[in-house]
Image: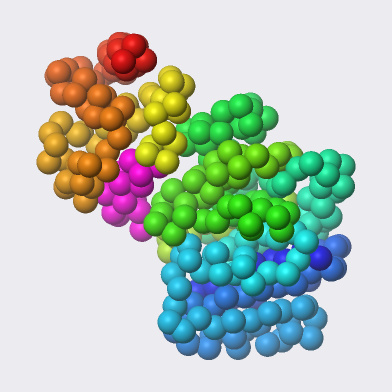
């Protein structure tokens, strides 16, 4: 059985669209687990017509859990041999999506999860392929931390996982912006092998109410969670110059020129790992107008990278 785990919050029309897509799936041994954070019964009412067509387990959270706590709850209540954490604003694009994902597990019993091409749809109906760095899906076992450069696995809706994953990996409930990157890196570091399907099986719905929009208006969240994730990766990750360069550009782009700049982003200095402080002190010695010039910034970054490795 496959569990479709849906952490819901208002937007009953989105939930109904998702259930319609589940009904269209050629694979039928499915349960839908809905954990609802809505302050009203709008989602509960919207799913009523589907209860005699689908195996739906509905739970109304009082009080609301919030994400990603509600994500973990939905997964914990699932009973399937496999599960997909499906955001309510996403849906299955291909009627054979579940079958194709399950085929990957049958072909290789050693994989723990499978993901597909990361494709999103704008409100106007046009599609956007979100994945960058085409080679990265095939290199993640060697370079899991490089998901910070391009989230090629994509959001949770893009992934089917074995139930055994639940025992080892959960969504870190501190995160808002970095939560899916952190989870996917943790999957790989926990030793779960994976398969990639280069097909558009799931559509990610883009709209103005998404977390991306919220974080875009509260950039301190993005900065703070990047710093937290650096601590979770550990110093060894920064021996990869691409990871080092990513964080070098982060400090530069947020114009961190003084210790107070960390605090203005609601980040105590003691939470900043030594390698980032090394970058910070290196950038302070360079006029900011030079740091903004790509070639000069890259030269200073490599010099700072070499001195860090020598330390």
Which stretch did the figure color magenta?
212-229
Q: Quadrant of residue 167?
A: bottom right
The relative height of residue 75 versus residue 260 in the rendered view (above or below) is below
- The residue that appears at 59% across and 81% down in the rendered structure is 59
Q: Which colouring convention does the figure follow?
A: rainbow
* Number of numbered discs visible in the structure rendering: 0
Residue shown at 41% from the left, 33% from the top = 234
Report x, y in % for residue 131.
58, 38
- Taking 54 as reference, is 294 above or below it? above
Q: Would you say residue 170 sits in the magenta stretch?
A: no
Residue 227 locus on image (x, y percent): 33, 41
Q: Position of residue 211 (x, y in %)?
A: 42, 58
Asked whether the viewer can see residue 253, the reply is no
Q: Position of residue 261 (x, y in %)?
A: 16, 40
Q: Nearer the viewer, residue 78 or 147?
A: 78
Q: Quadrant of the N terminus?
A: bottom right
157 and 225: which one is in front? Answer: 225
Residue 108 appears anywhere in the view: yes
Quadrant in the picture for the C terminus = top left
In percent of the image, x 78 and y 61: which residue is there?
81
Q: Say if the magenta span includes residue 219.
A: yes
Dominant SS of magenta comes to helix
Up the image or down, 1 lies above or below 273; here it is below
Along the line of sight, the residue nearer the viewer: 164 or 78? 164
- Asked if residue 71 is positioned above or below residue 297 in the image, the reply reads below
Residue 94 shown left or right of residue 272 in the figure: right
Left or right, 116 with reference to 37 = right
Q: Quadrant of residue 156?
A: bottom right
Q: Is residue 85 left or right of residue 295?
A: right
Q: Residue at x 22, y 42 (%)?
A: 270
């Amino acid at each position: 059985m496959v569990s479709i785990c849906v952490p819901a919050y208002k937007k009953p029309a989105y939930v109904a669209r998702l259930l319609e897509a589940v009904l269209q799936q050629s694979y039928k041994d499915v349960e839908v687990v809905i954990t609802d954070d809505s302050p009203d019964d709008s989602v509960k009412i919207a799913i009523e017509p589907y209860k005699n067509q689908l195996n739906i387990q509905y739970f109304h959270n009082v009080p609301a859990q919030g994400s990603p706590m509600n994500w973990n709850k939905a997964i914990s209540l699932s009973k399937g041999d496999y599960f997909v954490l499906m955001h309510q604003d996403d849906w299955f694009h291909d009627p054979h999506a579940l079958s194709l994902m399950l085929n990957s597990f049958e072909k290789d019993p050693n994989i723990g999860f499978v993901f597909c091409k990361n494709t999103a749809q704008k409100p106007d109906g046009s599609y956007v392929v979100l994945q960058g760095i085409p080679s990265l899906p095939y290199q993640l076992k060697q370079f899991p931390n490089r998901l910070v450069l391009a989230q090629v696995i994509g959001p949770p809706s893009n992934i089917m996982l074995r139930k055994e994953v639940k025992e080892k990996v959960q969504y870190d409930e501190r995160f808002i912006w970095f939560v899916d990157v952190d989870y996917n890196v943790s999957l790989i570091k926990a030793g779960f092998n994976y398969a990639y399907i280069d097909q558009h099986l799931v559509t990610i719905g883009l709209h103005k109410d998404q977390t991306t929009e919220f974080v875009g208006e509260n950039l301190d969240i993005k900065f703070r969670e990047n710093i937290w994730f650096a601590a979770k990766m550990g110093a060894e990750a920064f021996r990869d110059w691409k990871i080092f360069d990513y964080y070098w550009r982060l400090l530069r782009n947020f114009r961190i020129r003084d210790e107070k700049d960390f605090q203005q982003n609601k980040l105590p200095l003691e939470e900043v790992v030594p390698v980032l402080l090394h970058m910070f002190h290196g950038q302070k010695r360079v006029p900011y107008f030079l740091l903004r010039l790509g070639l000069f910034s890259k030269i200073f970054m490599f010099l700072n990278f070499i001195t860090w490795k020598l330390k």
